[in-house]
Amino acid sequence: MAIRAIVISIALLLGLGTFIPLATEYAEAGAVKTKRYKNKKKKKRYWRGVKKYSKRWWQLYRAQERRKRQVAQRRRALRLRQMRLAKARQVAEERRAAVAAGKTQPKETAAVLPSGAPAPKNWSVGSADSNELKFNVAGNSGSNVGSASISVVGAATGDSSSRFNNKTVGGIPTTALRRDVINTMIKENGWVVNDYQKQVGDDTVYVVVAQSQGRDGRVHSRLFYFTEAGGRVYSVATNSATDSAERLAEESEKVIQSLRGGTRRTQQAAVRD
């Protein structure tokens, strides 16, 4: 019995010796385990695949800022031309209203182009809307021989001196301009005959030649000139009988030169194949 009691006592002591350390480890008095975090390296910031603030990054950043300034300048210039168009339309409307009210006698006055220069002497302001300035064109006898219109197609989005300039006008593809003319002709039961690049002075303009049937049953000549001036793309369109088409073409080229800011010698057309 004594031996059995001794064995049981030793077993109890061994059990307590194992249990107490385990209990102490998970008790409040035990050591507190801290979570270890791996040191993560800072990720490098890249823009357009270039490390930020590197030499190449600053080159791209300055180029982006230059483009922003150019766009802002073109928008301001476009707004100025729109204000001039609106003023010209307002003057024409006030003059017609005064004539209709009998306050003044109708008289021929020189029409003004969006550039501020006077229009050809036989051009008089016709109807106008928010995006287009229209003119009536008189012949030598004073009778109406056709019409002309000047409108802004949109802001130029590219450099006119680009080597791709033969396919664009101020960044707008010539295919898109031709497509707009085709849509216009479809609405007016007309058709497009040809398109080509033409040298007017020192500048190249895009010309679309079309035809339509007038109310008198005769075929009318339609010319659409597209040119870039002052950060925007202009359209100068004429509608006349075929015998007056050449004269209106010459006057339209003078208008284009005025829009571009100077009078230059007109050269012969270079027809595109």
Image (tube, grey):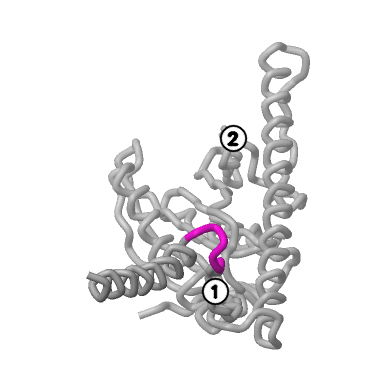
Q: Nearer the viewer, residue 105 or 173?
A: 173
**What's the magenta region?**
27-32
Q: Amino acid at mark 1?
A: Tyr
Q: Is residue 182 magenta?
A: no
Q: Is residue 213 left or right of residue 24?
A: left
Crowding around mark 1 (Cα neighbors within 10 Å: few <14, some 14 to 19, many 20+) is: few
Q: Position of residue 12 (x, y in %)?
A: 33, 68
Residue 29 sits in quarter: bottom right
User: What is the chief secondary structure element of the magenta stretch?
Assistant: loop
> Residue 138 location in percent, x, y?
58, 43
What residue is rendered at 68% in x and 19% in y?
Answer: 97
Which of the two residues, 268 or 204, is positioned nearer the viewer here? 204
Q: Residue at x 65, y 75 (%)?
A: 201
Query: Do the residues bearing badges 2 and 1 touch, measured as CB atoms within 8 Å?
Result: no
Question: In the image, residue 230 lies at what x, y percent?
Answer: 69, 62
Mark found first going from the N terminus, 2 or 1: 1
SS at mark 1 in the image: loop
- Whether 195 is drawn above or below 183: the answer is below
Q: Which residue is mark 1?
A: 37
Left or right of 137: which side holds 93? right
Residue 129, position as x, y percentages in the image: 56, 34
Q: Is residue 245 above or below residue 35?
A: above
Pick the front one: 146 or 114: 114
Residue 126 marker: 2
Neighbour tally class for label 2: few under 14, some 14-19, many 20 plus, Cα within 10 Å: some
